[in-house]
């Protein structure tokens, strides 16, 4: 049997990505997101259009997509409810966001120079994709507060242990991506830790790990 409901969140599960971009002063910004999907050598990213990452992407026309394994969930959660924008919107302030100018330091990860783009990579991430912006569009109405960015992968960096020997392919048995499903963290099909973002969104989750 199915029940017709007014579905509040359509967040069925996508890989977590750390997007690194350059701020106006040349420093690095780092933001977790999980509205991303790939087709060929292109990726579509869904972002809040008031976010520092969206502004950096629009201005710099480039980024690095650092794919996160489930073992790095603590790194991602350290960046939850942080922003690289000094001015907080009333909504973000009410949710408990704080301005953090050095996101790499907050996350406890290392900047690694990219080959093509100016934004740095996250050295600890086993998959790093240097990308150029292709197109951007408003998602829904202009008041919706969301934007879609299409980027093209210019260069891929993959940890050797994830590559099938003698090929240009990632071993799916060795790659365990961190998945965000309805604002909670999952890896290998199981919840891996509570999410600060889920707390801020007041998600009514049952049976998920508690602190």
Image: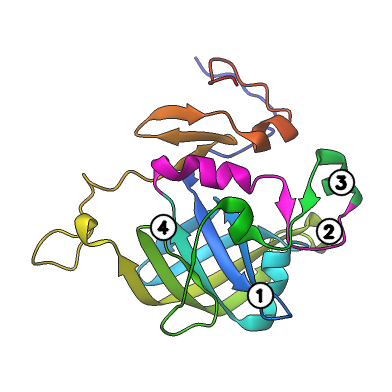
Is label 4 or label 2 in front?
4
Q: Position of residue 18 (x, y in %)?
A: 53, 57
- Decide which of tag 3 and tag 1 comes sooner along the chain: 1
Q: CA distance from mark 3 to mark 2?
A: 19 Å
Q: CA distance from mark 3 to mark 1?
A: 24 Å
Q: Compared to 92, does 28 lie above or below?
A: below
Residue occupying image coordinates x 28% and y 61%: 159
Q: Position of residue 55 (x, y in %)?
A: 72, 72
Is there any visible trace of residue 13 in the rendered image?
Answer: no
- Decide which of tag 1 and tag 4 comes sooner along the chain: 1
Q: Which residue is mark 2?
A: 143
Is label 1 or label 2 in front?
1
Tell me the tag on residue 27: 1
| Secondary element at tag 4 | loop
- Decide which of tag 3 and tag 4 comes sooner along the chain: 3
Q: CA distance from mark 3 to mark 4?
A: 30 Å
Frontmost residue, 64 versus 43: 64
Q: Which residue is mark 3?
A: 93
Image quadrant occupied by the C terminus: top right
Whether residue 137 sits left or right of residue 86 in the image: it is left
């Amino acid at each position: 049997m199915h029940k017709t409901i007014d579905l509040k969140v359509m967040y069925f599960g996508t890989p977590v990505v750390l997007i690194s971009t350059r701020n106006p002063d040349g420093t690095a910004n780092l933001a977790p997101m999980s509205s991303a999907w790939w087709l060929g050598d292109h990726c579509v990213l869904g972002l809040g259009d008031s976010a520092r990452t969206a502004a950096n992407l629009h201005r710099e026309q480039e980024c690095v997509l650092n794919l996160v394994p489930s073992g790095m969930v603590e790194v991602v959660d350290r960046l939850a409810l942080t922003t690289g924008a000094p001015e907080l919107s009333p909504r973000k302030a009410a949710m408990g966001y704080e301005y953090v100018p050095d996101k790499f330091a907050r996350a406890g990860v290392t900047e690694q120079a990219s080959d093509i783009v100016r934004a740095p990579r996250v050295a600890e991430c086993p998959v790093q994709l240097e990308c150029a912006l292709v197109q951007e569009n408003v998602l829904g109405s202009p008041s919706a507060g969301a934007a879609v960015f299409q980027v093209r992968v210019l260069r891929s960096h993959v940890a050797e242990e994830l590559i099938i020997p003698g090929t240009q392919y990632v071993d799916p048995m060795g790659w365990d991506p961190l998945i965000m499903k309805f604002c909670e963290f999952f890896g290998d099909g199981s919840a891996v830790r509570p999410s600060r973002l889920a707390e801020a969104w007041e998600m009514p989750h049952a049976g998920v790990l508690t602190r």
